[in-house]
């Protein structure tokens, strides 16, 4: 194995239903429904997926949703802003825990 | 060329959807490709056109085309290239076509309108009521210049303003200015109506530009774009995706069913893409303009190949944009 990640594996995603067909069917149906046009447009959902893909650092998802965003009509500027949303939330999540640090420190010091 | 093993022959897909053999249903668009000379050399160009190309339609071929049109009732003539405006006989050809009472549409790369010697092209089009289909990959500079070359976006915007100033693409006039969009890479076009709304909003807001319709086109695995697919090892996956998205409705509406395409040498093809692949009209129909026979050509069997999946994927693709609902 050259790498834990192989781009061709993305095309085998549906193989995950093979040994748990009911769960697989339920998941993939749900997945498809989630990305259908609803209160949010397909384009908005794709941009959210791109941002989440960066937050969870999934190379398959980044590859898939970069292309999907372009095919839904988003441009690089919008996609880059979406990534910054993920970055801000990840960074902000760390920083806001700093309050816990401050609370702990307050308890331990005069 | 990379081997593709995972996709069915196009004929098989047609058979499954009851469309084989694919037949023409008359000729309503007579497409004349005047040659490969162009002031640009775009990355997605299926014609491999550029400033150094020498192929140009000769006077005899032009005369033969005009003779055919004179004797037929084909309503629309679609002039393409290269940059067709660079052909020395372009203007007289347009004037003669108008005298024949035909609707003339032309494929314009926009930048030609700001080159020396071509600045009056918009006015010339207006005078002859030519319908303009202008190429613009995107409403932003970065994406446009990446596909068409540095500086193209600004020139294109200047040209579009010129067209608007004389009434093209403006409400209340009959001067049609449509824009043609190709993706700036390996991906497929967004839905035509969605992207048209983006283009109208952004071009209006940023530059005060208006136009009639946006025509979205899939990048065809032909010419310079096919070379790009090969070079980046994406040919197989691109073809597989095209085939996977085969849409019966788009297949039924392919442009070759009502178009005849003539190249600079007078050879006849079912479409501009077959022209670039040199797959001439066949199945017993004549393949040169000098042998034009309306009876044989009107219901000819179309010559197909794997590249035809480019016109039948998803919402479909044609010189007139999407052909079906995805």
Image (tube, coloured by chain):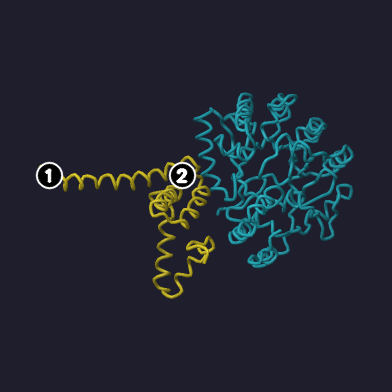
For disc 1, the neighbor class at 10 Å (few under 14, some 14 to 19, many from 20) is few
- State left or right for residue B274 relative to residue B61: left
Q: Residue furthest front?
A: A109
Numbered label attached to residue A109: 1
Q: Above or below — where is B46 with respect to B59?
A: below
Numbered label attached to residue A30: none
Give how far across and how far down residue A14 sits, in percent.
Answer: 48, 67
**What's the CA distance linking mark 1 and mark 2?**
45 Å
Asked which quadrant contains residue B24, the reply is: bottom right
Label 2 element class:
helix
Q: Which chain is yellow?
A: A
Give how far across and how far down residue B322 sits, in percent.
Answer: 60, 49
User: Quarter holding the C terminus of chain B?
Assistant: bottom right
Give how far across and how far down residue A110 sits, in percent.
Answer: 10, 42
Q: Above or below — where is B140 with respect to B189?
A: above
For disc 2, the neighbor class at 10 Å (few under 14, some 14 to 19, many from 20) is many
- Residue marked by disc 2: A79
Label 1 element class:
loop
The colour one sees for chain B in the rendered image is: cyan
Which residue is at 73% across, 63% downward? B21
User: Quarter holding the N terminus of chain B?
Assistant: bottom right
Which residue is at 69% across, 56% downward? B307
- State left or right for residue B187 relative to residue B307: left
Q: Above or below — where is B24 with respect to B146?
A: below
Give how far across and how far down residue A16 sits, in percent.
Answer: 45, 69
Give the chain of mark 1.
Answer: A
């Amino acid at each position: 194995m050259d790498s834990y990640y192989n781009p061709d594996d993305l095309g085998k995603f549906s193989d995950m239903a093979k040994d748990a067909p009911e769960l697989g069917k339920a998941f993939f149906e749900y997945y498809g429904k989630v990305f259908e046009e609803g209160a949010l447009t397909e384009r908005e959902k794709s941009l959210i997926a791109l941002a989440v893909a960066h937050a969870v650092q999934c190379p398959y998802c980044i590859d898939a949703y970069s292309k999907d965003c372009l095919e839904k009509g988003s441009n690089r500027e919008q996609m880059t802003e979406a990534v910054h949303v993920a970055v801000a939330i990840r960074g902000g999540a760390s920083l806001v825990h700093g309050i816990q640090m401050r609370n702990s420190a307050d308890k331990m010091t005069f | 060329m990379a081997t593709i093993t995972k996709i069915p022959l196009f004929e098989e897909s047609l058979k499954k959807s009851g469309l084989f053999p694919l037949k023409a249903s008359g000729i309503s668009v007579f497409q004349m490709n005047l040659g490969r000379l162009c002031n640009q050399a775009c990355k997605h160009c299926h014609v491999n056109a550029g400033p150094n190309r020498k192929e140009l339609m000769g006077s005899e071929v032009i005369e033969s085309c005009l003779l055919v049109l004179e004797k037929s009732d084909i309503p629309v003539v679609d002039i393409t290239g290269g940059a067709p405006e660079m052909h020395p006989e372009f203007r007289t050809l347009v004037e003669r076509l108008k005298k024949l009472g035909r609707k003339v549409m032309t494929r314009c790369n926009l930048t030609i309108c700001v080159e020396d010697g071509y600045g009056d092209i918009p006015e010339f089009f207006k005078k002859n009521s030519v319908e303009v289909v202008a190429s613009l990959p995107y409403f932003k500079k970065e994406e446009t210049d990446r596909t068409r070359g540095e500086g193209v976006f600004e020139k294109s915007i200047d040209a579009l303003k010129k067209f608007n100033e004389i009434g093209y693409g403006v409400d209340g006039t009959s001067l049609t200015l449509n824009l043609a969009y190709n993706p700036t890479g390996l991906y497929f076009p967004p839905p035509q109506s969605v992207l048209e709304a983006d283009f109208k909003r952004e071009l209006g807001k940023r530059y005060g530009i208006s136009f009639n319709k946006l025509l979205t086109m899939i990048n065809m695995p032909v010419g310079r774009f096919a070379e790009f697919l090969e070079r980046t090892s994406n040919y197989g996956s691109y073809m597989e995706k095209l085939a996977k998205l085969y849409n019966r409705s788009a297949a039924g509406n392919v442009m070759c069913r009502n178009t005849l395409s003539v190249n600079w040498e007078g050879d006849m093809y079912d479409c501009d893409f077959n022209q670039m692949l040199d797959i001439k009209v066949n199945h017993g129909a004549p393949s040169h303009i000098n042998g034009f026979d309306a009876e044989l050509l009107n219901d000819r069997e179309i010559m197909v190949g794997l590249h035809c999946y480019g016109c039948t994927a998803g919402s479909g693709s044609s010189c007139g944009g999407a052909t079906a609902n995805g």
